[in-house]
Image (cartoon, grey):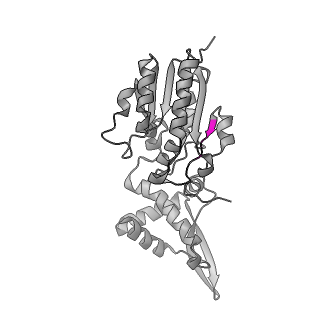
Amino acid sequence: MEFTRDTAIFIDLENVYYGLKKYHMDPDHPEIHHNLFLRLQEYYGKDSIRMMEAYADFEQMDLSMMSLQKKRVHVNQVYGNGREGKERKNAADIQLCLDAMEVLYQIPEITTFVIVSADQDMIPLLDRLWSKGKKVELFSLWDESLSKSSQIQEFCDQSHNILEFINIEKMNDYTQIDRIMHNAVLQIYEWYRDPNNIGKSYGSTWIKNDLARKFSLSELESNHLFTRLVKGKYLLPYEIEIDEKIFYGYKVNLTHPQVQMIVKIAGYKVS
C-alpha cells in the first residue's frame, strides 16, 4: 500500500512551550497520550507526514533536542532575547512563516499545512496558504491566553484545542485544587532551597498554614490539598535531628515523574 506524504507540520514550539508551562505540562511529555509530537503523528499518520518542523530558542527551554529528533521532528534553533513572558521575543514565528512559504511554492504535492501556534501574527500565513487551495489546520491553546477578539481560527479549515488534543483535561479535570497542587509542590520545593531554612524541617501544620495563606484557601481546602499531596506521593515524610531532638516534616518526592516535571519547568535542575 502506498502512502502520499502530503502533510507538513510547523510548530511554533516556544509559543506552545510557555503556553503549557502554566499548566505544568511539557509538550514532550513522557506519556504518549500527553505528548504533542506523538499525538500529531498518531492523528495524521506517520506515513502521511512529509515534515514536522519545530521552532524555538532551545537554549532557553528545558527540552531535549535529541528526544525530539528521535521522534522525527526537525528542530530549528532560533535565538531570542533570553527573556520570558511578555518580554520574550524572538524570530521563531518569522522563520516558521518563511519556511512554510518556501514549502508552498517548492513542494506542490503538500496539500495539508498544519500550524501549531496561538500567535495572531500567523493570520497572514494561514490566509495565504488557504488562498492557494491548501487545506489548513490550526492547533492552539483555547484558554484565557487566546484573545476573545482573535480571529485566527477563522483563517483555517479546521482548528483544534491543544489542551484537549493532548488530553490535559482528562488527566486532572482542572478543578481549582488540581491546578493549585502543582504550585504547592513548587512552594514546598523552594522553601527548602531558601538559605534561611537550611537545617530546618517543614512541618505539616506550617505547610498547611502557608498553603492556605498563599493560595487563599480555607482550612478545609488546605487540609484536603495537603492530603492529596501525601496520598499521591508528591510529598514524603522527612525528619531532622536538632539539639538531640527529632523534628518531623515533609519534602517533595523528586523521584515522582510529575514532581520532576514541575521542578524542571520552573527552571530547576533535577539531579
Q: Is residue 168 above or below residue 97?
A: below
Q: Total of numbered circles in the picture?
A: 0
- For the point 52% across and 59% down, the residue is 231
Q: Position of residue 84 (x, y in %)?
A: 50, 54
Q: Is residue 173 above or below residue 134?
A: below
Visible in this render: residue 43?
Answer: no
State the predominant SS element of the stretch in magenta.
strand
- For the point 57% across and 56% down, the residue is 259
Horizontal side, residue 52 vs residue 208: left or right = right
Q: Is residue 257 magenta?
A: no
Q: Is residue 250 above or below residue 89?
A: below
Q: Quadrant of the N terminus?
A: top right
Horizontal side, residue 24 vs residue 50: left or right = left
Visible in this render: residue 38?
Answer: yes
Compare residues 119 and 230 and report the one nearer the observer. 119
Q: Quadrant of the C terminus?
A: bottom right
Q: Which residue in the rendered view is the most extreme toward the top?
A: 1
Q: Position of residue 63 (x, y in %)?
A: 62, 47
Residue extent of the magenta highlight: 75-79
* Figure quadrant of residue 200: bottom right
Q: Position of residue 66 (x, y in %)?
A: 69, 41
- For the point 54% across and 74% down, the residue is 202
Q: Which residue in the rendered view is the most extreme toward the left?
A: 149
Q: Which residue in the rendered view is the most extreme toward the bottom?
A: 243
